[in-house]
Image: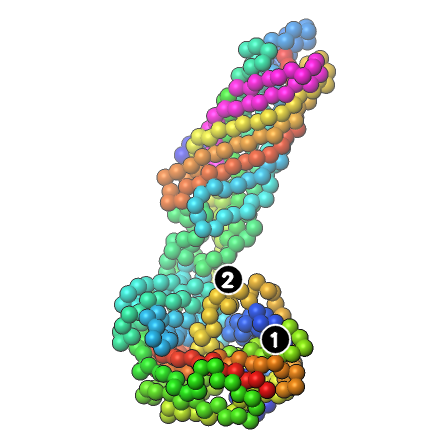
Amino acid sequence: MKSFNVFTPLTLLTLLLFTLTAHAENGLHSGLSVSAAVGLSKVDIINDAPTRPDFNNSTYLQLNINYALNEWFEIDTGIISYQASKTEKMTDLAGTYQLATSANALQLGGRFLLNFDNDIRAYFRLGGSYYRVNLEVNESFDDIKESGKDSANSSGKGYYYGVGIITNASKNLEIQMEYSGQHLTDVFEDSSRPFDIRYKGVTLGARYNF
Amino acid sequence: MTFKKTEHDHFVTFPLLLPAVVLSAVLLLSGCIETESDTPDSDISDTGVSLFLEANIPLGDTLVQVAAAAYEDGSPAPLTGGDVLVARTESEEKALLVFEQRDNYYKNTLIMNNPDTEVELEVAFDPQGTRSDRWYPTEELLVDPGPGSIVGFQASMTFPESIDITGPVANTAYSSRSDELALQWLGSASDELVLISYNTCFFETSSDQISWVDSRNITDDQSHTLTVGDLIPEDGVVETINTTGNLLAAFIQLSFSLFFEAFTFGLYEPEEIVIPSSALEYCTLSISLVRQKEGTLGEGVSGGRVVGSRSDKVVVEYRP
């Protein structure tokens, strides 16, 4: 499976945004906005296995570039990077094992906005995603056999959603808080035990309108 | 530790709630509790691997209970990293499961319609099968340390004639510690006969109860008489089951579900106690007779024992 670097396209987009910043400083909104947020997410694994892991929470970084088609709808694009989240150590007939998972995803969808007044807006966003998951296992064997670790990657499709509120901080800068979910479906789809990963979390971020 | 030796055979007491006591039996079985009476078991080799295997068919049952314990260089040695004990009857094949994770005692129950056939045991290397309950695809992620030194070991065992307890009658109530408990049974003798007694006493003034396991080897001549006081002494304490073979026999006789139930209640320390008749409401004595037939240890192990056994059980009461 090929890997992708989510930060390369961001560099190109950043250059474009510098150009557009000049446009915004002239007091005109181009319809383009960029936002960045950090969050904390619960991680759940969904499949029919007899055991279920308990991952600790994952911190994540979310970057979005939106383009407003009108007052209430925007095209929503972004990337999201979930940092490694670990399970407790578990034991079975083979030994003691602990897993860690991390994920990156590209997002494409729409954002629907609702104006409450001039200072506060609410929104709902929804779309599809393309993900890459890394799963790592550490295994030990009571010091009877040599311990070690192994890892594997899986790519696939999923979907995301989010609801949030935006409030103005200045003419071009807004603060936003969001509750969001990311559902990565059929991870290791061709294996004997595929699973879904469900992230649910809250973010706090800033948005700049050009 | 607070155990004291007496003249009684292989006996241990715990002043515990019932589940805790069953757990104590587990601890004894797993070697977690050391007592003054612990003695080196000559069947466990100081060097190399020792395996204890027993398959037992209770009277009238079409199931065989298989248990095993593994030791290396004289110490408990869990099978790990894909090594697994596999038991096989004429009807099915199953892996033996650990009672407590990372323990070295294993047990499972298999269908066995014909007790005249063999039970085979093998130490296999099955890295996928031993991880089959994991939630992720182990074929994608696997730390494989390779097979252990005893993989490939095989043993088989056949069974002695069945044993059928004819006396005392179930639920017989005895009123004095001096009462004779006359055991009688049918069936031809084999290599060994072990008496396993799981005793529980209830008190008039307390909701607490005491349970313990007792084992002793007796002669297989269809009768054996002992007193109630031999099994329910007035001033407790004594000596634990002192051979690994008898621990395994007791491990089989106590139900797996009781073990799991007990485990949820946590750990308790054993204490010395007395059991005066005046405070007792009653005691139950679940007595199993286990007729054992020696099997042959295969190559690749330094010590241990292989036994095929058949058993019968009777429950009586002591009500002073």
Choose the circle earlier in sequence order: 2 or 1.
2
Q: CA distance from mark 2 to mark 1?
A: 28 Å
Residue B252's spot in the image, x, y percent? 44, 73
Residue at image point 26% right, 76% down:
B116
Q: Chain of mark 2?
A: B
Query: Disc 2 marks which residue?
Result: B101
Report how many numbered discs are placed on residues in the image. Answer: 2
Nearest to the eye among marks 2 and 1: give it. 1
Residue B166 is left or right of residue B247, and the answer is left
Residue at image point 60% right, 21% down:
A123
Q: Chain of mark 1?
A: B
User: Is A63 within the magenta?
Assistant: no
Q: Kindly report the secondary structure that dominates the magenta region of the rendered protein.
A: strand
Magenta segment:
A110-133
Query: Disc 1 marks which residue?
Result: B209
Instruction: Note whether A54 is above or below B18 in the view shown.
Output: above
Label number found at residue B241: none
Residue at image point 34% right, 87% down:
B186
